[in-house]
Amino acid sequence: MTTANQAATGQTAVSTAVKTLALNPEKIAVTPTIGDYHILGDILMERCLGYTTMPCPPMTKRTLELGAKNSPDMICTPFKITLGNQIEAAEQGANVFIMPGAGCRLGFYDILQRQVLKDLGFKVELISLFDYVPTAKRLFQTLSSINPDLTQEHFDRVFATVVQITLEMDKLADFMRRNRAFEITKGDFQRAYQDYLQEVIDASCADAAADVGIKYDKILKAIPLDKPRRPIRIGILGEIYVVVEPFSNCHMEDWLTEHKVEIDRPFDLTRMAMAINSVPELIEKSGGYVDYNLGSTANEVIAQAHSMMQDGIDGIIHVKPASCSPEITAMTILQNMSRDFGVPVMYLTFDTETGEAGVHTRLEAFLDMITMKRQDDSVSEVVNQAVAEGNQAGINQKKGEGY
Amino acid sequence: MKKAYLGVDIGSISTKGVVIDEGSNVLASSYLWTQGNPIQAVKNVVAELKESLPDECVIVNSGTTGSARKLIGLILGSGVVKNEITAHAVGTLSVVPEASTILEIGGQDSKIILINNGVVMDYAMNTICAAGTGSFLSSQAKRLDLELEDFAELALSSQNPAKIAARCTVFAESDLVHKAQIGHSKADIVAGLCRAVVLNYLNNVGKGKQIKGPVVFQGGVSKNAAVVKEFENELGLPVYVDPNGHLMGALGVAVLCKNAQEELFFDFNITNLDFETRGVECEGCPNHCEMICVYREEILLDAWGNKCDTGMTLVSNQAA
């Protein structure tokens, strides 16, 4: 990845297959952290606008504090976190930020963030990528209005690369989530995936990106595993930011992985992009539980939950930031599905608190519960043994009057 | 020698200890206030248990649950450290095997556990709200200058409970002040509060869950007869409160210990040892993890709160 320092010394990582732009050292662009997707923003900035890019400073407690302090209290959590990212990056010299500018309230983050950053005295440029219309055409309009020299042909090639990388990234990450808990050498998957990210960012065109993807697909699939025939399988669904960004969900996936759980998390950027333009199909896939557009990606959540439950998943964890209205709507529908299919669903709401203990308590209890259910479809050994011995010992003599 | 198993439940308000034998019979139990000092509370509980435990019994494994389970698990050298939900389900089912729903309201949190054929099917726990928990009731009792023990009796005497907003502690409190100022009697207000706790619980924790009988109610608030009555009214079902309801978490973890088939040395001497915890902020990176280091007689036992290995290295170097 090209950083501000590298740009200053004249080194750029952009390959030659697409006509490279000389990077402007005056413009230092940062994509706020959301999983590993910032590499996509970096590619757009470097190759379409010729901006230097800088990695977002790592998320810490300070990021949250800064974000929360300068945000309206009732706004959704991703706003606070991304604002914290922007402030910390601005302190380190960044002066361009990109935000998607589409979706639910997420679509309006940039307007408010622009104002907050200005009030704080930062002279920064905030680019709203989609400017409220999530299409490739609109993205080209946005970028070409900033860089009038950007041709449609050049944009198309960069965009195709970005799309290719997104597809490959999501495919590899999905495979990793399903198998990471069972790797024999701890850290194999993470190492290989990080190597992939390092390598793919330099892919000069869509074909080159696809080659890197194929290479790492083989590497990931060759990692030795010790996977039981039917491992405990837990689905994760909900609001995209909290699902995708580990810092915002108390590193839930790491915890589940350590406890030997196969994670079924189909929600990623690929699915999100598809979901926005395919609400009618999603409604069809919801098994009659919903017949209208719920807003944002809530229809996708319902459709995914339905297919997971039909597929015999052990349990589903639904996550959302505090006050996320599309997901609140989805929750009530999930409750009905949970009752009908007999699949437990746990609901977690995240805000700027950093206490992991509460989340881990709930995860442990959830996992205990589905493990007990699994032990013998309807009978749990642990409990039944306890019950049998409890009866035998007669320590429950005192009860009875109550009923 | 008779094998025995110790279960300790260290909650925010009270600390409970139970010793059972191999038949799950309770040999000794203890129930004391935590008073913000879980280590001292556990020492007191262990000392009390030792007093009442028959001489021939030897504790071969111990387990902890409750919010201080990790800390106390380390101090006791426990083989089982379990979350409250699992512990309560196992404990309750060992006493009331036919239970379908467990309602629980503790000092700091509340939960609901749904059971089908002795297996936990679903549960929920309050997330970010303290309304409808024991600490809310006790702070309001203080505001009204009442002893918690008199609370239920007064509430039950009310003929016309005041309507108190149940949505949120802050609203409930201002509503309560308002009702008092316009002249509602203390009994009516207290009865209204008990009702508010029940409604809040059912709306927040129990929402969307099908509550079926037999219903067991436990946790500190289950000792409040007025709350029990409100639950019965709202649910239209009899609500069973076990006299040992407060011990279910400790009992559950003791049962889990017994089932663990692992034997670990347990030393009653911990009551005489000096344990200390120190909070350290790791300066290794901007994350500034708040770490807790636990020392026994000045020797570092363990530390946690760090998100990476940097903190651990730092702490052990300091200790060395």
Image (cartoon, coloured by chain):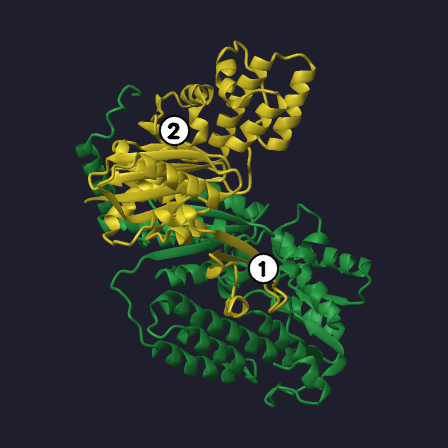
Chain colours: A green, B yellow
Where is the C terminus of chain A found, in terms of image quarters?
Answer: top left
On the image, the x and y values in percent for residue B316 come to 50, 68
Residue B197 visible in the shown view: yes
Nearer to us in this view, A20 or A60: A60
Q: Which residue is the extreme one toward the front?
A: B272
N-terminal label among 2 and 1: 2
Real-space CA distance between mark 2 and mark 1, rounded to the nearest whole angstrom: 40 Å
Query: In the drawing, what numbered circle is on residue A277?
Result: none
Decide: is B101 above or below A153. Answer: above
Which residue bears the numbered disc 1? Answer: B280
Q: Secondary structure at mark 2?
A: strand
Q: Which residue is the extreme one toward the left?
A: A392
The residue at 43%/25% (across/down) is: B223
Q: In screen coordinates, is A98 left or right of B14?
A: right
On the image, the x and y values in percent for residue A184 come to 33, 73
Nearer to us in this view, A255 or A195: A255
Q: Numbered disc 1: what chain?
A: B
Callout 2 and callout 1 share a chain: yes
Which residue bears the numbered disc 2? Answer: B217
> Nearer the viewer's eye, disc 2 or disc 1?
1
Residue A83 found in image quarter: bottom right
On the image, the x and y values in percent for residue B211 come to 37, 31
Give the amino acid type for the residue marked by disc 2 in the picture.
Phe
The residue at 30%/40% (across/down) is: B90
